Image (cartoon, grey):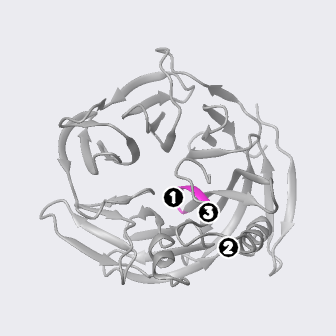
């Protein structure tokens, strides 16, 4: 069921899985190249919800620390951004963040605010009324922030940082009850220039919107991936109350024309894992297709990022509270 923490050289072993329509998915089994369970200043991390890779650096937010940690590619601490607390520029529960150039927007889950940092220094805060229940990736483009906030008609809220106005758009999936429709329309949001990817946490769907007119361009269904199909079939057979549901997608990432989903696998009782990263790729006509699956060696991961310059994945192992790196270069 839904849980905000977790719903939860390199050795390559290749296998092929056939989807219902004859699509073959390459599975790449990874082994850990490097890992840390504490930082080089002897401080710890335990609830990493968001990770990002850029310019030789790895960024992550830890819910309990209240800051953003900056590492080099060898996982050595370089610096931290922000401080824990309830004052201006401080955060008590660092959840997700967005990095855009030299700016970082960090969501404080406890105080329901967005803190903006420029070059690692505090600039200002925003308190959009629409972020009362944001537990997924939000997105930023130009002077606007985008949040997954379902209402009676739409699933996404657009917040202007200039005039604080809020607009709603986005498809709303219908479920059996109003409560289910409300809670099961959560999305992970990713921006790619003029486009916004919206990824359901409980349905095998990737939506793509045009941010210029907020229209839905296309929707990709990945339920034909064998382990996703089996997970959906099993979870449908399980009883849930009106205020809970099973999750398919735990974390997402985008780089270039590729979108990555960290997915849960739950095909039977006592058979839960969250260790498969599915890579999707958009072709020249922006049509999405499954590219490959990366199989991580641990049982449960909660967040990850991809450094395409050196072909590495960095992921937070929830069970061991460690950050692990994996070489994904094809050899």
Task: Tell which of 131 and 121 is nearer to you.
Answer: 131
Rounded to the nearest angstrom, the CA distance separating label 1 from label 2 is: 20 Å
Rendering coords of residue 92 (x, y %): 32, 37
- Name the mark on residue 207: none
Camera-nearest label, 1 or 2: 2
Task: Tell which of 278 and 135 is nearer to you.
Answer: 135
Rounded to the nearest angstrom, the CA distance separating label 3 from label 2 is: 14 Å
* N-terminal label among 3 and 1: 3
Q: Residue 256 magenta-drawn?
A: yes
Asked whether the viewer can see residue 307, the reply is: no
16 sits left or right of 296 in the view: right
Asked whether the viewer can see residue 117, the reply is: yes
10 Å neighbourhood of mark 2: few (<14), some, or many (≥20)?
A: some
- Name the mark on residue 256: 1
Q: Residue at x 77, y 41 (%)?
A: 297
Q: Residue at x 75, y 75 (%)?
A: 224
* N-terminal label among 1 and 2: 2
* Above or below, 316 relative to 219: above
Task: Tell which of 269 and 101 is nearer to you.
Answer: 269
Describe the element under mark 1 as helix, strand or loop. Answer: loop
Q: Which residues are magenta?
A: 249-257
Name the residue carrying label 3: 247
Name the residue carrying label 2: 222
């Amino acid at each position: 069921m839904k849980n905000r923490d977790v719903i939860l050289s390199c050795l390559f072993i290749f296998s092929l899985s056939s989807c219902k329509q004859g699509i073959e998915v390459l599975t790449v089994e990874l082994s850990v190249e490097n890992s840390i369970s504490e930082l080089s200043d002897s401080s710890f991390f335990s609830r990493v919800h968001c990770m990002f890779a850029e310019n030789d650096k790895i960024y992550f937010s830890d819910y309990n620390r209240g800051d953003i940690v900056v590492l080099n590619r060898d996982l050595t601490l370089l610096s931290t951004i922000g401080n824990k607390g309830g004052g201006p520029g401080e955060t008590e529960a660092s959840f997700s963040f967005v990095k855009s150039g030299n700016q970082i927007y960090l969501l404080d889950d406890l105080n329901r605010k967005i803190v903006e940092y420029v070059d690692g220094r505090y600039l200002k805060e925003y308190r959009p009324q629409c972020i009362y229940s944001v537990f997924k990736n939000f997105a930023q483009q130009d002077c606007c922030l985008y949040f997954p906030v379902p209402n009676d008609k739409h699933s996404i809220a657009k917040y202007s940082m200039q005039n604080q106005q809020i607009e709603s758009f986005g498809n709303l999936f219908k479920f059996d009850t109003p409560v289910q429709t409300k809670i099961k329309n959560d999305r992970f949001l990713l921006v790619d220039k003029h486009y916004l990817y919206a990824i359901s946490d409980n349905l095998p769907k990737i939506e793509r919107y045009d941010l210029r007119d907020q229209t839905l361009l296309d929707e990709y269904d990945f339920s034909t991936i064998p382990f996703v199909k089996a997970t959906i079939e099993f979870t449908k057979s399980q009883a849930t109350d009106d205020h809970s549901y099973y999750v398919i997608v735990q974390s997402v990432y985008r780089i270039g024309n590729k979108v990555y989903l960290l997915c849960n696998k739950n095909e039977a009782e006592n058979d839960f894992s969250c260790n498969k990263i599915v890579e999707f790729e958009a072709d020249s006509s922006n049509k999405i297709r499954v590219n490959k699956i990366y199989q991580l060696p641990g049982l449960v991961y909660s967040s990850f990022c991809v450094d395409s310059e050196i072909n590495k994945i960095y992921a937070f192992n929830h069970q061991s509270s460690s950050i692990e790196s994996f070489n994904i270069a094809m050899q």
